Image (spheres, grey):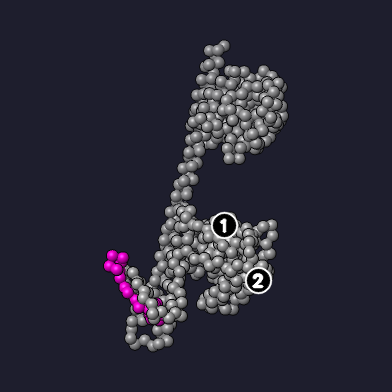
Amino acid sequence: TDRKRAETIQQIQYRIAQAAVSSANLQDLLTVTRNELSKLIDTSNFFVAFFDKGKDTLREAFSVDEKDEIDEWPASQSLSGLVVKKGATFLLRKEEIEQLLTENHIQLIGARAECWLGVPLTDENVVIGIMVVQSYDNPNAFDRFSAHLMEILSHELVLYIRRERAEKDLVAAKAHAEESERLKSAFLANMSHEIRTPMNAIVGFADMLLDPEILPEERAQFSGIIKSSSDDLLRLINDILDISRIESGNAAVDKGEIRLNGLLTEIELVTRQKLARSGKTHLDLELRMPMPDGLDSIVSDVYILRQVFNNLLDNAIKYTPSGHIIFGYEIPADGRIVFYVTDTGIGIDPQYHDVVFKTFRQANVASHHQFGGTGLGLAICKGSLELLGGKISLDSMPGRGTTFRFSLTFERPRSLNRPIRLQSGSGITEPSKASSFFDWADKKIIVVEDEPSNLEYIKRLLAPTKARLFMCENGASL
Ligand code: ADP
């Protein structure tokens, strides 16, 4: 009787609400739901699936079926997808299914049911999934009462799913916050080491230069140390500026014509100087440029290309005790050009192959004090290349060496023979020595600068040009 049915529904609802509190996971709750449902309707074929809006697919979360086993299927072509799109319950017989399929130009996925009942799982007006029962032999297996019962239970399920998802999000957010906190502390510890080391050298040796007793060769040596420590500090500052620009989305791309062979030869020269400075002249350095001069022009961002090569080559030098470093590019194919830097160094354990491209991440924290570094270099490479639609990957075995490869779209300039466009780099650049080549004895220069040390520096820089200098602090005192 109706009264008996209403009572049974109430009991079922009560048990499922209870199970929603005690179930360890969704699978347990769905098992209870199916058992309870089967007291009133046939649940021989029962499934719950979630809708993935991005992929427009349905993915099975729970299923018991006499005939089918499907994990994931396109929503746009299925009956269950129709329930999701319309956000309404569908109770259908075989003939109605056929008609609906023809009208909506969809195909039936899986075996044909004699009777099919699907209710949407709706959370705050958004359909997140579907619950279905079907019968392969009884055309009258379900009626409006069954549909009503399924709808009631779908609300209980949605509440549970919402809570479970919120819990998962919380756990993930907590883990993310803890990881960020850990990385921040590691970064600060690292950074204070990376800043203090060159800073101590600069302050210490600058003090020593003040000693009138020191010998000329000592003076040259101390100045050299101050210079190379300043370079280290400058690199660090530029790295931090670069990564913050990339992460804040403020990094811009400046494309122009680049003669690859010229650029790489210049990078090779700088790398040889670095090898000498780090006492690694025993390493073989080889540059491979398969395109002939004159046909080696591409359109790209020269600053990014130079920055990526410099970072990769700095790492290759740092992490290679003996053997060789080879860098260059391959003949372009399929509209892309591949660049590489390969070394015979210490290599990177496969478990760190993804992690090293992340900010502040290093392959082996224990090795940090041996090699120094901030873990920014590769993150900058990846971020900068992404601005150009480029990709970077690595291939490495511990003890055998590492190869970094990155690819860019191969864009030919319209004229092959225009000179390389000079592009300014970002961040602070080193002062040029150009002033010593100019005779400006007949020129007047107004220098507006309120920082005494900068003023002193500019005065000294311009002194060899013999220009007449007029100093003032700001525009108002001009
Ligand atoms: P940093 O060198 O400042 O630590 P990077 O982002 O440039 O930061 O590199 C991240 C990590 O990747 C390094 O700490 C190192 O463990 C590993 N790595 C990078 N390049 C190489 C290489 N050529 N050989 C071995 N390990 C490398």
Q: Position of residue 438 (x, y in %)?
A: 44, 79
- Is label 1 in a helix, a strand or a loop? loop
Q: Which residue is mark 1?
A: 388
Q: Residue furthest top?
A: 1
Mark with earlier residue (2, 1) = 2
Please name whichever residue, 18 or 451, is drawn nearer the observer in this view of the structure: 451
Residue pictured at 45% horizontal, 64% vertical: 427
The amino acid marked with disc number 1 is Leu
Q: Quadrant of the N terminus?
A: top right
Q: Is residue 7 visible?
A: yes
For the view shown, which residue lies furthest in the front direction? Answer: 442
Give the CA distance from mark 2 to mark 1.
Answer: 24 Å
Position of the C terminus by quadrant: bottom left
Whether 43 is drawn above or below 57: the answer is: above
What range of the chain is rendered magenta?
Answer: 459-478
User: At x 51% / y 77%, what residue is drawn?
Assistant: 277
Kind of residue sitting beneath label 2: Asp
**Residue drawn at x 50%, y 37% as measured from the top left:** 164
Classify mark 2: helix, strand or loop: loop
Q: Is residue 225 visible?
A: no
Q: Which mark is on residue 293?
A: 2
Percent of width and height locating residue 432: 45, 74
Q: Is residue 400 magenta?
A: no
Q: Position of residue 148 (x, y in %)?
A: 56, 20
Which residue is nearer to you in this view: 363 or 331? Answer: 331
**Image point (33%, 84%), residue name:** 211
Q: Comparing marks 2 and 1, which lies closer to the viewer?
A: 2
Q: For the image shown, how many numbered marks are present on the structure?
A: 2
Query: Height in image: 35 above or below 361?
Result: above
Q: Nearer the viewer, residue 237 or 164?
A: 237
